[in-house]
Image: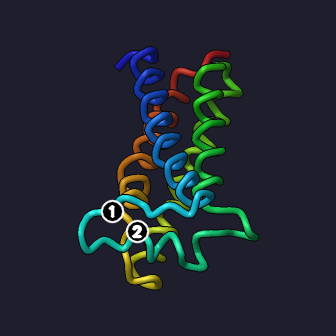
Amino acid sequence: MSDRTLRLIGAAVALAGVGVAGYLTWAHYSNATVVCVRGGGCETVQQSSYAEIAGVPVALLGLLSYSAVTALIASDSGNARLGAATLACIGVLFSGYLLVLQLFVIHALCIWCVANDVVIAPALALVTGLRLRGSPA
């Protein structure tokens, strides 16, 4: 797969992350009810004590991280590739932690969070990691 293709996929995945995290951030600050599948635990997860770290919504941290990765993919220097891969790998580890919290501590699943934790974050980590192989000098 060409670097150009990986770059486009990475940008698309990062923008999907911006969309999900942006929606959850908006819902947090507007006190809106998150659209969720029937019987879903979106509100339970969003209102749990784990939805914030030191008063900052986890969704906002995601929004900032996905935005930073998007900017780094656009920059495309060797350091930007390393930065994007590093942020993406930290994000996938944090997503795993959040998924464990949903399953075993909160006992509720937010479909938006699961989409991020299981699909978006790992895909971004994979794509940004693959791009390091062809990093420009």
Q: Residue at x 34, y 20 (%)?
A: 1
Residue 42, quarter of picture = bottom left
- Residue 92, position as x, y percentages in the image: 50, 54
Q: Residue at x 49, y 34 (%)?
A: 15
Amino acid, disc 1: Cys
Q: Which residue in the structure is indicated by mark 2?
A: 42
* Residue drawn at point x = 46 percent, y = 40 percent: 124
Q: Which mark is residue 54?
A: none
Q: Quadrant of residue 61?
A: bottom right
Front residue of 83/135: it is 83
Tell me what residue is drawn at x 52 percent, y 21 percent: 134
Instruction: Name the element at disc 2.
Output: helix
Q: Residues within 10 Å of mark 2 (few under 14, many from 20)?
A: many
Q: Earlier in the sequence, mark 1 or mark 2?
A: 1
Residue 35, position in %: x, y?
Answer: 36, 58
Against 137, is 118 above or below? below
Taking depth in this image into account, of 20 and 89 the one nearest to the observer is 20
Is residue 108 positioned above or below 38 on the image?
below
In this figure, which residue is indicated by the disc labeled 1? 36
Q: Do the CB atoms of the residues marked 1 and 2 lie less than 8 Å apart?
A: yes
Q: Position of residue 93 (x, y in %)?
A: 53, 59
Q: Label 1: how many residues lie within 10 Å, few (<14), some (14-19) or many (20+)?
A: some
The secondary structure type at the circle numbered 1 is: loop
Look at the picture and state if 108 lies above or below 37: below
